[in-house]
Image: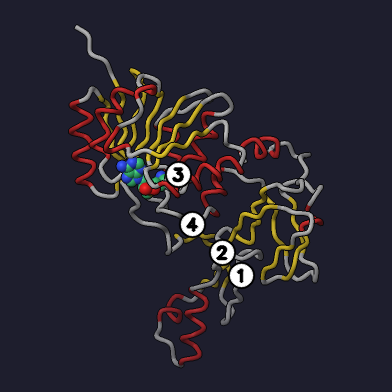
Amino acid sequence: MLHKAESAANPCRPIADGDLVIVYEGFDSMKAVRVSANGNYNNKYGSFAHKEWIGKPFGSRAVSRKGSGWVLLLAPTPELWTAVLRHRTQILYAADIAMVVAFLELRPGAVVLESGTGSGSLTTSLARAVAPHGKVWTFEFHEQRAQLAAEEFKANGLGELVTVAQRDIEASGFPEELHGQADALFLDLPKPYMVVPSAARCVRPDGMFCSFSPCIEQVQRTCQELNAHGFRDMRTMEVLLRQLEVSRQALATDLESSMAPPQSKKQARRQEAAGNAGGGGGGNGPKRQKAADGSAVAVVAKPVPFGRGHTGYLTFARRVVEFS
Ligand SMILES: C[S@@+](CC[C@H](N)C(=O)[O-])C[C@H]1O[C@@H](n2cnc3c(N)ncnc32)[C@H](O)[C@@H]1O
């Protein structure tokens, strides 16, 4: 995925047979599709023949056979992959991932250790951050999850950057050959505090540690262990995302009459519709709302009501060495 996505950054890169394409129907409706010369993609707009996509650049808009709708054909990126991947576990989403990549201070060539791999959502972003010559070692104790993740990374072109191994990291720690090798280390485990002694052996001085935990008690125990094992500059943060939806809305110009209670059920329905204009999603953008009573129509931005709340706490720490 990464190598293909990189070459897809070139606007001339055409879609080829066998490519992974992210089919975009709307910001909340995307699917990962493997292009095959005989394949078809079907949705509510009708049928799309893959062979029509081959040779077109990533970023193309494809119209359905009967012309009743369209989809966008996007190059796979870690951000889009997180939006479309098959969930085998809970996953990290873009807002937390962005903080992890930034505060782990990842750069091309870096070596990162991760556990558990889960669905590989974070791993894919770690891989892009350390590419082209870095390495992600990711450990998962669930045999089938480890195997599926390894297969997916390979199919997505990440086979050389990411190595998956099956291992109980809480019980056994990271392998000895990785001691002193990590520029950064990330844990998404039920008992991250059990892994801190091993993390201290793996992360080089001035390297970064991060743990993702849904409960504050996990954070407290992890911080105690970090403090006891030479980590300093500890910071815990919770990332809360607030999205805004931009749409057209009917705004009453006559404040008095707009605040008066509705005189009939029909009028109540009209007032409610005026207040709920927009909606987004789908391939056709925000709906236009006509003012029922001649009031002004304006473009407004309001917070999306279904935003994700608490996902977890991110605890970062830096490994330091004392000298006297
Ligand atoms: C929440 S998932 C990780 C999701 C991942 N961060 C992502 O973004 O897709 C946690 C994973 O840790 C694995 N796990 C739990 N305990 C473990 C242990 N002791 N050693 C290794 N992996 C473990 C679980 O099997 C699960 O797949």
Where, quadrant-wise, is the N terminus in this rendering?
Answer: top right
| Mark 4 residue element | strand
Camera-nearest residue between 292 and 25 = 25
Where, quadrant-wise, is the C terminus in this rendering?
Answer: top left
- Image location (x, y in percent) of residue 228: 18, 26
Earlier-in-chain disc, 1 versus 3: 3
Q: Amino acid at mark 2?
A: Ser
Q: Quick check: 241 left or right of 236?
A: right
Q: Which picture quadrant has residue 260?
A: bottom left
**Dot 2 alpha-carbon crowd within 10 angstroms: few under 14, some 14 to 19, many 20 or more:** many
The residue where tag 2 is placed is 247
- Image location (x, y in percent) of residue 276: 50, 73
Q: CA distance from mark 3 to mark 4?
A: 37 Å
Indicate yes or no: mark 2 CB to ligand 1 under 8 Å: no
The residue where tag 4 is placed is 244
- Image location (x, y in percent) of residue 313: 30, 44
The residue where tag 1 is placed is 287
Q: CA distance from mark 1 to mark 3?
A: 44 Å
Checking the image for residue 146, the label placed there is 3
